[in-house]
Amino acid sequence: MLLLFLVVAPSAFSQTSGQQKIYVTQRVNGESPDIDGRIDEEVWNNVEWSGDFTQYRPDDGAAPSQETAFKILYDDNNLYVAVRAFDTNPEEIVQRLSRRDGFEGDFVEINIDSYFDKRTAYSFSATVSGVKGDEAITGDGDNWDSNWDPLWDFETTIDNEGWIAEMRIPFTQLRFSANENQVWGIQVMRRLYRKDERSTWKHIPQDEAGWVSNFGELHGIKNIRPKKQVEIAPYTVAKLERYESDPNNPYLDGSDPYLNAGVDGKIGITNDFTVDFTINPDFGQVEADPSEVNLTAFESFFDEKRPFFIEGSNITSFQITGGGNPYSSDNLFYSRRVGRSPQNYPNLNSSNNEYAKVPENTTILGAIKLTGKTQNGLSVGVMESLTAAEFADVNRNGVTGEEIIEPTTNYFLASAQQQANNNNTIFGGMFTATNRNLSSPTLNNLNKSAYTGGLNFQQFWNDKKYYLSSNIVMSHITGTAEAIQLQQESSRRYFQRPDNDYTDYDPTRTSLTGHGGIVQFGKQSSSGFRFVSWLTWRSPELELNDMGYLRQSDSIFQVFWASYRFANPFSVFRFMNINFNQWAGWDFGGTNTFKGTNVNLNAQFLNHWFFGGGINLEGDEISNTFLRGGPSMKLPGGWNYFVNLETDNRKKLQFGGSHSQFWNFGNIGNNKDFGVFASFRPTDALRVILRPNLNLRNHTLQYLNTENVAGEDRYIFGSIDQKTVALTARLDFTLSPDFTIQYYGSPFISAVDYSEPKYITNPRADNFEDRYDEDVSFSSEDYENGYDFNFRQFRSNLVLRWEYRPGSLVYLVWTQGRTGFEETGRFSYQDDFNDLFSVHPQNVFLIKFSYLFGY
């Protein structure tokens, strides 16, 4: 198929282009403009204003409410942009402050496709209040990476005609060819906040596919040389951790001081390729993960928050599924594997006075990332990272020592993508390698090596409205028989299932090789009719979790999605989306494991309120994981509905709420979720957000244990009554665009009460009640009361961030955590809340100082 499209596509599929818009700039002769937001220097008179903007949203194609115009100049080192945002009511201009990339209030923006590849661009946004926004655009506008933080500057002023933004963008922050005459793609956009209106210089209708490929053009730049970027930022960190001391534990004396130093850097090898590196990194300023109680057999997925791994993540991502489903996180690279928590723990007997001090995460000795794109459209990314061996300090009845709990590990990634056929054909691949130094027999439970590889292909036609794409992956892991047996028995595959007749469970194996992928076909646009149909699969032997993320193997998943979007205002709506979904799944033995359908809509009213809702119908399920290594089990399907409502997000006070409920057929279970939020802006510099949530879950079957009785495995379940309450509070105080204070706090309480213990007897019986027996007298376990628990946790993070010069930062951080556990199962919010805050806190105080050389 790939060869066929490469041969046929150039002749079979052609692109049509509408009327092109061109801006011609000039070089600065003499003194360059002062960046003061006034544009009163004579040099600005050397170029013409360009305007004639068109609404993009809400009324696509209409005239904007206010006029906008811009000018562009350049010299040997910088591009200069002046934007005049006319406003007949300048007193109504919204000047909200936020942290960088907050995009609050009125702002203007320029997108620059300096490669002129019509797929990638750099976005620079300037709010009237002086806050920067910058994003790296890839995938022809599909991906906007706000973690890209280039070094540039601007100033704004307000006058009786509106407001002005004057920008200076160094050429070191852009990538372009060495051609004598440059042609770049550009788009200039304005947001009029009080009307929630966006207008653009080069009108791109919402039913047009693509963004960067439809830009206007910038002409007139001549005889500039590509610049090599060099930025080095050494830093130092001082940290003090305070916690409750334990006189019996020699490792818990109440405090742990910490002093560290490292270097972050960015070096332009050529104008096309940049190396990012970090040596001995510290990420103490990042926000903690949300609390949860995971009662499933599967690993939780948490978002990456460390800047080094977030920036440029498009080049290191290789997904093998579409979005909005349980497999949507599956990827060849899951960056949180690098620096993960140690996978082993010392074998201790607390009754014999045995204690250990275990590091929370493995130490990243260094990481380096090479990214870039050639003038021929070849994008390349290479990442190499090395983590240290980690040891636990162990005290066994006064005898101290060290035990290795995580080996030295090397992580390697390489990816490439090539554009062809006027950007209508894209193909490439990715390779990852994980290698561990298993220097001790205690590490034999880990894979020694893991390799994954993937190939991707994408073909567009009919002005990029239609596409066919495919991602194919393979994996190969090696290790001891112990390690590979653990992989075969993991919740991702359960080869040991007694009714598994299509895979081989072999405890002597020392390797596994698997495959997976996705093929999809669809129509894309921002308005009108859209659809996508895809098929994704994971063979039983596929394994990605050494460097990537895989929730479950042994699956084939089919989805069809269709949508109609009313992009322009009509009746009482600003826009509306109506969506339909259908899905089904199978295992590799051919069993139809699940199926379902969904109808939903979301809309914004003319008063700027949002509404959304939908209904799901789930068919009966055949689960290969429900008994956690036992035979597959038939589970009833059910109904689900969900609704959400939000008030106008432009207002100083905004409210919202959501509710969903799922009923299993046969009244065997239900799950209710209630959420509300309030956002309050007493001033343009301060925002407070509160988001409480309540979840009520009841089900006849929740896994408790597996017991062996007379050589037979019996799978013990209980009825579960779970109540979970969480509150997330955020405070953002922006004293200036370079000085911010942010607070995050989240108490979390979950009570789980089990009753009516039972064991599974006939997991695929026609009647649900015939699938289990409530007589568990064979067991000595107290399943009625012995498994109940209350989990309480509080996590908070207070961060003061000061960018005292461009790229140079000071962080002051206070992190507090409290975690409590009690075997009761009785829920009382007041008692649980009081008990939570009676737990002795763990406090971490941190100061981090960095200084950027190269600006």
Image: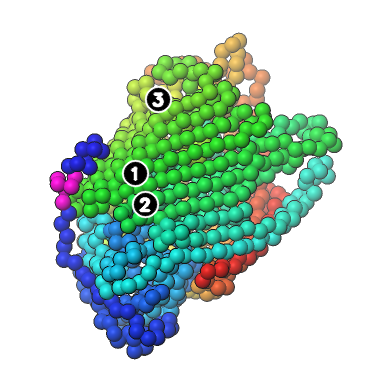
Q: Residue at x 74, y 32 (%)?
A: 348
Residue 498 to residue 494: above or below: above
Residue marked by disc 1? 428
Can you give x and y, in whole percent of width and height, for residue 141 in the image? 32, 57
Whether tag 3 and tag 1 are in contact, CB under 8 A, the answer is no
Q: Which residue is mark 3?
A: 622
Q: Magenta residues, as a range?
A: 9-14
* Mark pair 2, 3: CA separation: 43 Å
Q: Secondary structure at mark 2?
A: strand
Q: Horizontal and vertical percent for residue 855?
A: 51, 71
* Whether label 2 touches label 3, CB < 8 Å: no
Q: Residues within 10 Å of mark 1 (few under 14, many from 20)?
A: some
Report whether 626 appears left or right of 645. right
Question: Disc 2 vs disc 1: Cβ atoms closer than 8 Å?
Answer: yes
Residue nearer the viewer, 514 or 227: 227
- Identify the amino acid type marked 1: Gly
Give the image quarter of residue 780.
top right
In whole angstroms, how far apart are the C-alphas of marks 3 and 1?
A: 37 Å
Q: Is residue 190 magenta?
A: no
Mark 2 Cα-neighbour bin, 10 Å: few <14, some 14–19, many ≥20: some
The numbered mark, 3 or 1, whose residue comes first in the sequence reads 1
Q: Which residue is mark 2?
A: 379
**Residue at image location 42% in from the left, 84% down from the top:** 34
